Structure formats: C-alpha cells, structure tokens
Amino acid sequence: MLFIPIARVAFPMQAPGVIQQNAKRYKKFNLLCWEDGKNRLLPQDFADIIDWQELANKINMDCDQIADDYHTLVLCDNYRQAGAINYYSKHKNITAYCTNGDYYNWLLQDKIEIKNIT
C-alpha cells in the first residue's frame, strides 16, 4: 500500500503544471533537488526529457535545407541532446554526436567526410 502514494511522485506521470502545483509532495522526497544541489520546479529526470521532440524538429528544419545530409555532422553539447536528436529526428542519414559520456567513443567512427556542421 505504501507503493501507490510514492509512485505518484517517484514516476513523472503528470503534466509539469500538476507537478508544480504539488511541489510540497515532491520536496518531501527531495525530488526537486537537482545534481547541483538546488531545488527546481520539476524533478531533474523529468525536466531533462521535456522538449526532446522540439529539439529534433529544429534539427530537422536545418537538415531540410541541406541537400547532402549524409555528410552532415550534428555536434551537441551533451549526450541528452545527441540522444534526443538521434531518436526523434526524421533524418536517419544524420547522426548527432557529442564529446560527453559514451558518445565520445562513437564520434566519427565511420570516418566519413564531413561537409556540413549544424
């Protein structure tokens, strides 16, 4: 029976506005504290996934303007961005990379000639 109340705050199943309205409940379990030690309006894991599709759509619009997307490098600041673009982008010829985390090991493994960077 204890699982049900905890599940309501431990797993982000509600809209961001609902989470913000119930901030006390989330603070009680320290879920609003991010890795930098500061409390925010949303749990970090939940906030990290918001707007992934929007990010990929911005890259899609850029890549729509490039005739040769096979020779395009999408260089990101972190693996969250690279992963979001690789998962949600409609352009399957492009691959997003970053020098952060495991993506560093994959960077330019194919050794293809890069003509465009976005």
Image: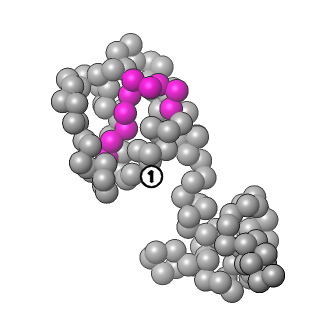
Quarter of the picture holding the N terminus: bottom right
**Image location of residue 102, percent across then percent down:** 30, 53
Q: In the picture shown, does residue 93 fall above or below 85?
A: above
**Residue drawn at x 79%, y 75% as measured from the top left:** 4
Horizontal relation, residue 59 to residue 75: left or right = right
**Image location of residue 9, percent across then percent down:** 71, 73
**Image location of residue 94, percent across then percent down:** 38, 28
Nearest to the observer: residue 36 or residue 89: 89
Nearest to the observer: residue 54 or residue 86: 86
Q: Main secondary structure of the magenta part?
A: loop
Quarter of the picture holding the C terminus: top left
Here the colouring is one colour
Nearest to the observer: residue 87 or residue 47: 87
Q: Is residue 26 visible?
A: yes
Q: Is residue 58 visible?
A: no
For disc 1, the neighbor class at 10 Å (few under 14, some 14 to 19, many from 20) is some
**Residue drawn at x 59%, y 60% as measured from the top left:** 47
Q: Furthest-bottom residue in view?
A: 28
Tell me where residue 12 sits by quadrant: bottom right
Q: Amino acid at mark 1?
A: Arg
Residue tagged by mark 1? 80
Tell me where residue 28 sits by quadrant: bottom right
**Residue drawn at x 58%, y 40% as measured from the top left:** 54
Horizontal relation, residue 12 to residue 111: left or right = right
* Highlighted range, magenta: 89-98
Taking the magenta stretch, the answer to whether it contains residue 97 is yes
Q: In the picture shown, does residue 72 fall above or below 7?
A: above
**Regarding mark 1 in the picture, which secondary structure is present there?**
helix
